[in-house]
Image: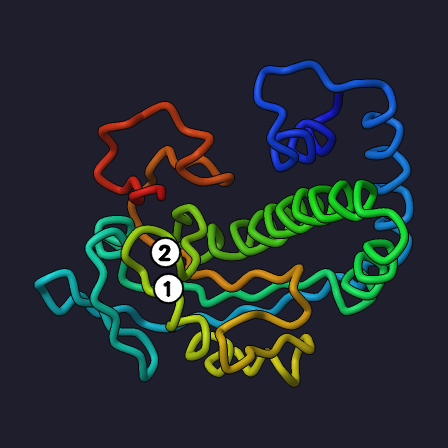
Amino acid sequence: MDQLTKEAVRYLGYGRNAVDDQTRTMIAESFEILQSIAGRKSIYRIFCLEHLGDNRISFGNLEVQSKSLAKNLKGCDKIVVFGATLGIGVDQLIRRTSLTDMAKAVVLQACAAALLEEYCDECQEKIEVQMRKEGYYLRPRFSPGYGDFSIEHQYYITRMIDSAKTIGLTITDSLMMTPTKSVTAVIGLSTSEENCHRQGCEACSKKDCIYRRDII
């Protein structure tokens, strides 16, 4: 089972339970069609980062109070503000499928989430190559909604990267992203190297790391 399939199975909630052949086939078919219609787009911008004390940080015109984010960004003096999407075609496919085959729609949702995560990892690898040339190392992605980093900041982040114009990513009044298979995140930049997993704290066994985010 390849890593992308493993991620889809994880999103489907199988845990350690075996995946039946029918579901495996449905996953493979879902990835095949998603790969053909996904309109992958991403954008990032880099800002200076200020640590204001009392778990407050500032970048661009945004000030954030978050214990978990401040911990993750300790030692960083710059920050990447990042957005990515699989495009509206994926939403349309899932919506159409849900009208006739809910089980398949659920599998499509899981596969799309795995595909988005893979795409974000690829984007982060490219950013990392560029920033290494400038003497910087990346921390794991940290999205609004992690720990006490309020989901409300999603709105401000999309404005900072002008995501509506650059990649077609908008935020509704209820703070939902459109297209739904999209991500916003920040990535700390530090001149000191830390052995952080690109995939983030879920993939790391070092539970006492001072940069670890609070996973909820």
How far apart marks 1 and 2 lie (CA) works out to: 5 Å
Q: Quarter of the image containing the N terminus?
A: top right
**Residue 79, labelled with which disc?**
1
Q: Residue at x 82, y 34 (%)?
A: 27
Query: Relative to residue 180, is residue 130 drawn left or right?
Result: left
Q: Residue furthest left?
A: 54
**What kind of residue is marked 1?**
Ile
- Expressed as whole percent of the image width and height from the top left, the position of residue 167 reads 68, 75
Residue 162 position within the rendered picture, expressed as x and y whole percent measured from the top left:
55, 83
- Looking at the image, which is closer to me, 98 or 169? 98
Q: Amino acid under label 2?
A: Leu
* Rendered residue at 57%/22% (across/down): 15
Compared with 79, 4 (above or below) is: above
Q: Nearer the viewer, residue 173 or 77?
A: 173
Q: Which residue is painted at 80% across and 47% down in the image?
A: 102
Q: Which element carries disc 1, helix, strand or loop? A: strand
Write down the quadrant of residue 93 in the picture: bottom right
Q: In the displayed structure, does residue 197 sit left or right of residue 117?
A: left
Which residue is pictured at 90% across the width and 48% down the height?
33
Q: Residues within 10 Å of mark 2 (few under 14, many from 20)?
A: many
Total numbered badges shown on the rendered structure: 2
In the picture, the quarter occupied by the C terminus is top left
Image coordinates of residue 190 in percent, x first then y, are: 32, 52
> Is disc 1 in contact with disc 2, using a CB cutoff of under 8 Å?
yes
Q: Would residue 132 be found to the left or right of residue 102 on screen?
A: left
Residue nearest the observer in this picture, 142 or 102:
102
Q: Which residue is mark 2?
A: 189
Position above or below: 159 against 80: below
Q: Is residue 189 left or right of residue 184?
A: left
